[in-house]
Every structure is written in structure tokens, then in C-alpha cells.
Amino acid sequence: MQPLSQKPLGLALMDRSPLTLTGLSCFLGTLNVANEIIVQETSMAGVAERLLYQPVDILITELNGLNETIAQCREVLLNLCAQQPELRVIVYTRSQTGRICASCLMWSISAWCPVGMNCRWSGSSFTGYLTVSAY
């Protein structure tokens, strides 16, 4: 009898920097959790469009994308969360504005990691450390 294999977690990544996307992908590959990166985009609008056709379990995202403002990304993210309530979201940002942090908490985002802090997020099936440092 073969052991049951757990389906890998489907991940979507968004950051305005392709270099950060590459680093995040490498980091996620080191975790002891089966995962598959399905979507990588440099804009929130791009992520939202792709997730209409390729749903994922977790979105890990910077708060603003390439050629997008934080306000634009916030609206897209809120709409995405309303359309896909089962989607778990991890948000990080380079901004150190407390107002942004407070608004993310009001969104009921799964995790929040301000720049320069080591953060731990623990969900029902995904546990990992997310470290974001200033450029």
C-alpha cells in the first residue's frame, strides 16, 4: 500500500522586483513544505488576472507592484480577497508607515511583516519564516 502524498500548496508571488521574486522563490524551495509556485508577477493587477484562471492556496505579495500605487494595489487585493475568500494572503512592504500596517490588519490579512523584521506566520498547513530587509 502506498502512502498518501499531500498535494503541494499552490503559491502566487508578487513583487515589483524580479530579483526579489527570484530570492523568494529560492527561499520557499528550502522550506520543508511541499509547495509549487504557480504564479509570479510584478504587479497586483497581473496577479489578480492570473488567479482568475489559476487559483492558488497562498498569495505572498509586496504591498505595491511595478507602476502601481499602494492604493491601487490595496483595491485590487481587496477585490481579490472578496472574489476568493479561501485565499490566504501574506503581505509585506518596504514602507514603514504605521497607517499602512493598521489598514492591513483591518483587511484581516493572514500575516503582516514590516520591512526589516523577522516574522513568523503559521497557518493550518504552511509554516515558514519570512525575512524582508530594506534595499
Image (tube, rainbow, N blue to C red):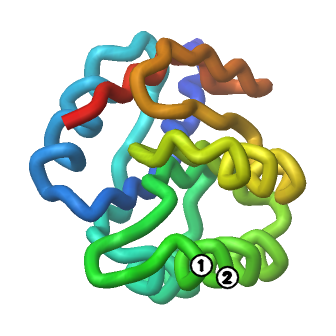
Side of 49 where 106 appears, left or right: right
Q: Quadrant of the C terminus?
A: top left
* Residue 37 tag number: none
Q: Looking at numbered disc 2 in the image, what kind of residue is underneath it?
A: Glu
Residue at image location 27% in from the left, 75% down from the top: 66
**Whole-percent x, y for residue 81 in the image:** 76, 70
In this figure, which residue is indicated by the disc labeled 1? 71
User: Is 118 or 3 nearer to us in this picture?
Assistant: 118
- CA–CA distance in space, label 2 to label 1: 6 Å
Image coords of residue 31 (percent x, y): 38, 15
**How far from the left and from the top, in percent, is residue 90?**
60, 43
Left or right: where does residue 83 sit relative to residue 8?
A: right
Q: Quadrant of the N terminus?
A: top right
Q: In the figure, 66 relative to 60: above or below?
A: below
The residue that label 2 is drawn on is: 75
CA neighbours of label 1 inside 10 A, class few (<14), some (14 to 19), many (20+): few
Using the rendered view, name the quadrant where residue 45 is placed.
bottom left
Viewer-nearest residue: 32 or 88: 88
Residue 2 appears anywhere in the view: no
Judging from the image, what secondary structure is the residue with disc 1 in?
helix
**Number of numbered discs:** 2
Is 44 above or below relative to 34?
below
The crowding category of the residue bearing disc 2, from other C-alpha atoms within 10 Å (few below 14, some 14 to 19, many at least 20), is few
Residue 58 in picture, x, y percent from top left: 59, 49
Residues at marks 2 and 1 touching, judged by CB atoms closer than 8 Å: yes
The amino acid on which the numbered mark 1 sits, given as a three-letter code, is: Ala
Residue at the spot 72% in from the left edge and 52% down from the top edge: 99
